[in-house]
Image: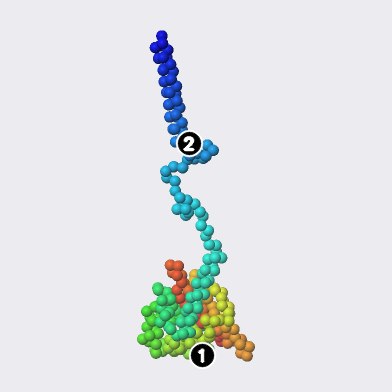
Amino acid sequence: MHFTFILKKNLIAMKKFFVLLVLGSLFVTGCKNGCNKKGGDQPAEDSTSYNKGERADTLVNTPQPDSAQIRITKDSILTSLTKEVLTIFKDRQYTKLDSLIHPEEGVRFSPYATVSSEDKKFSREEFNKLVTANKNKKINWGSFDGSGDPIMLTAAEYFKRFVYDANFVHPEKYDINKFIETGNSVNNLKAKYEGSDFTESHFSGSKKNGGIDWKSVRLVFKEVGGKYYLVGVVHDQWTI
């Protein structure tokens, strides 16, 4: 009888141990699946979690520049190019211009506001030859207003008379894609250079001459692959 009592006692102890073992296993399993949860409603982080700083491109919306910012940037570029081009003509360092000339369309020089297909046009190579090997050669640049006589000048003579005939590096007035003053000649710049941008550097006429001695030079630029190149140089003044 004593033996039977001991056996029953041992069986009860074993059952308690087994129950505790099962409960312990359930607790460990539950902890693995839910211990990372906060408040019971937050998803657990898995092994594929990443540093948010490494994915900023997908998590943060990068602000895009508005049209005003784009215009300011574009205007700054055109203004800088205008000063660079005019400084080349001022200093007569003409060989420096070839890298600014449009690589495919070249550059056209118009002595007056009306742009003509007969105006002299040069590729980069042709312009470089014009101001080096042919610098002393007189060529026909068009016709003088009024007399109609041919404009037979060397490159340097033409640039002094029909490009940089005033201190345009420091103009009295300056604007972008707007005409400051026009004369009697038909101004067809926008039609001939459709889709391009231009700047105008201007000096008003003097009172003693009734204002008819005003002068402007317009530089026309065309964008290629995000870069602007010179395609036209248009001189303007009072004409008969």
Residue 2 picture location, percent across and down: 41, 11
Which residue sits furthest top? 1
Tell me which amino acid carries mark 2: Gly
Q: Which labelled disc corresponds to residue 112?
A: none
Q: Is residue 106 visible?
A: no
Q: Which residue is mark 1?
A: 147
Name the foreground residue: 232 vs 185: 232
In the picture, residue 140 is in which quadrant?
bottom left
Residue visible at 56% across and 75% down? 175
Residue visible at 58% across and 87% down? 213
Where is the N terminus found, in terms of image quarters? top left
Tell me which amino acid carries mark 1: Ser
Q: CA gap, disc 2 to disc 1? A: 97 Å
Circles 2 and 1, Cβ within 8 Å, touching? The answer is no
Task: Give the secondary structure at mark 1.
Answer: loop
Q: Which labelled disc corresponds to residue 34?
A: 2
Q: Is residue 128 visible?
A: yes
Name the foreground residue: 31 vs 183: 31
Task: Please state which of the two labelled residues, at mark 2 or mark 1, is closer to the viewer.
Answer: 2
Residue 16 picture location, percent across and down: 45, 22
Q: Residues within 10 Å of mark 1 (few under 14, many from 20)?
A: few
Tell me which label, 2 or 1, sits earlier in the chain: 2
Which residue sits furthest front? 2
Residue 197 picture location, percent across and down: 50, 72
Structure colour scheme: rainbow
Where is the C terminus found, in terms of image quarters? bottom right
Q: Residues within 10 Å of mark 2 (few under 14, many from 20)?
A: some
Residue visible at 44% across and 78% down? 107
